[in-house]
Every structure is written in structure tokens, then in C-alpha cells.
Amino acid sequence: MTSPTPPIRAVVFDAYGTLFDVYSIGALAETLYPGQGAALSVLWRDKQIEYTRLISLSDPSPQGSRHYQSFWDITRASLRYALARLGLVHSVANEDALMAQYAELTAFPENLGVLQALRQRGVATAILSNGSPEMLQSAVHSAGMSDLLDAVLSVDSVRQFKTTPTSYQLVQDHLGLAPADVLFVSSNAWDALGATWFGFTTLWINRQGQPPEAMGPAPHHTGRDLSEVLKVLGLH
């Protein structure tokens, strides 16, 4: 059962895991490291998120952490850690190939249709992501989404990663909307929870059938893929 939703004036998407499949890189990883592709992609992602939290928690000042590194640099460092943790041979060629693939991750198949439907109905759309501006530009262009988004917001401008309030404030500052008027969409349960705490109306895209977070509040809405956005807005 879903909660009543205030009028939604914009839909803001997380990027990695929500619009772009972070585990699609497992196919290339498997080619480079037979039998270890899935393990590498999962450990790589987990370490990537761990590093963003380590940085933001170490100095969560309004000016941003003095330990800040771009998400691109964190992604590279996380890859190196994952390779070492799994005892896999590191080579510059393999690292560069995996990083190049990360810059153009596969988009989920329903994305374009949902974004096109929102555009046709005049609903404002944006991305809020930990990704660096260059990473996001590459991924959005590769997926054919450039003309379907009104804004692509990177936490790089405030040097704090989600789930700090400063990172979510970027949406309010850019769109000029009350948080409850924004539908924030994420496949990461921790991101949906942080966005709910901030005051957004939230939709958790539970693609992998994971249990909800054991602490609340729950997201306002839950679905299995991005088409749930249209259902929440009554556009399906």
C-alpha cells in the first residue's frame, strides 16, 4: 500500500543503479578475469560506495570535505582495491578498459520510454548523482538521454556525497521546489532513505528484490523498474 502523494512537479533520478546498470560491467570483467566477473563487479561497487561515505563522514562541513576526491577517482581506486582483494592480476590495460566501460554503462531498457513519456507530459526531469560531471555527461550521451533531461546535477559542486543534506539540497537550489514536490527515484535503498529523511517524496526501484532497510521511514513508493514512475504520477 502506498502513501498519499502531494502534487509532483519534478522527477529526479539517481544515476548509478537506477538509470545505468552498474553490474552490466560484469560481462567485460568476466572476459578479462574468467570466473571472477560477477564477484569483481559487486566488490567494486560496494567499495565505491564505502569510499564516498568515508570521505563525507570525515569532514561533513558546508564547504565540503578536505578529503574529497571525484567519483571518477574513487571508482578507479575502488577497482584497484577489488582486484587486490580478489587476488587478481592488475594491468593498466585491463584497468583502462574497465574504466572506459564504466563511463558508458548500459542503461536499463525501460528508461527511454519513461523519460519520453515524462517529457511529452511536461514533467521536469533531472539527475542527482555522486558521479562527476564528465562521467554523467558520458553516460547520459551514450544512453541517448541528453534531450530528455532538464538538468544533470553532480555533487561535485558541493564536494559532499549522498546522503548528506547538502547533496540533496542541490535539487531544491536548482529547481526551486519544495522537497515534497519532487519525486526522488533511486534503486539504492540507502539513497531512498536519505532522500526521505530530507523531505522528498520517494520511490525505491527495488530491481533485485532486496529486503527494505530495517530502519525507517519507508519510501513513499516501491516498484520493480522505472515504469513505476508513471504509475505513481498517474500517467500509465
Image (cartoon, grey):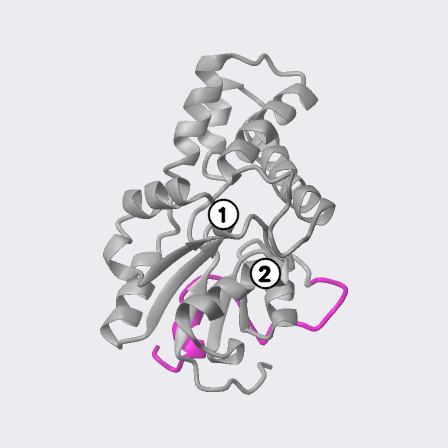
The answer to if 220 sits in the magenta stretch is yes
Q: Residue at x 39, y 46 (%)?
A: 136
Compared to residue 84, the image places residue 115 above or below, namely below
Secondary structure category for the residue under label 1: helix
Amino acid type for the residue under numbered disc 2: Thr
Q: Relative to 29, does residue 230 appear above or below in the rendering?
A: below
Highlighted magenta segment, given as a residue range: 213-236
Q: Is 123 in front, or is 178?
A: 178
Q: Position of residue 124 (x, y in %)?
A: 33, 71
Q: Residue furthest front?
A: 63
User: What's the CA distance linking mark 2 and mark 1?
Assistant: 11 Å
Q: Is residue 233 left or right of residue 161?
A: left
**Residue lying at 23% horizontally and 73% vertically, measured from the top left:** 120
* Residue carrying label 2: 166
The front one of 236 and 74 is: 74
Residue 156 shows which numbered tag?
Answer: 1
Lateral position of residue 22 relative to residue 142, left or right: right
- At 56% from the left and 48% from the top, the residue drawn is 159
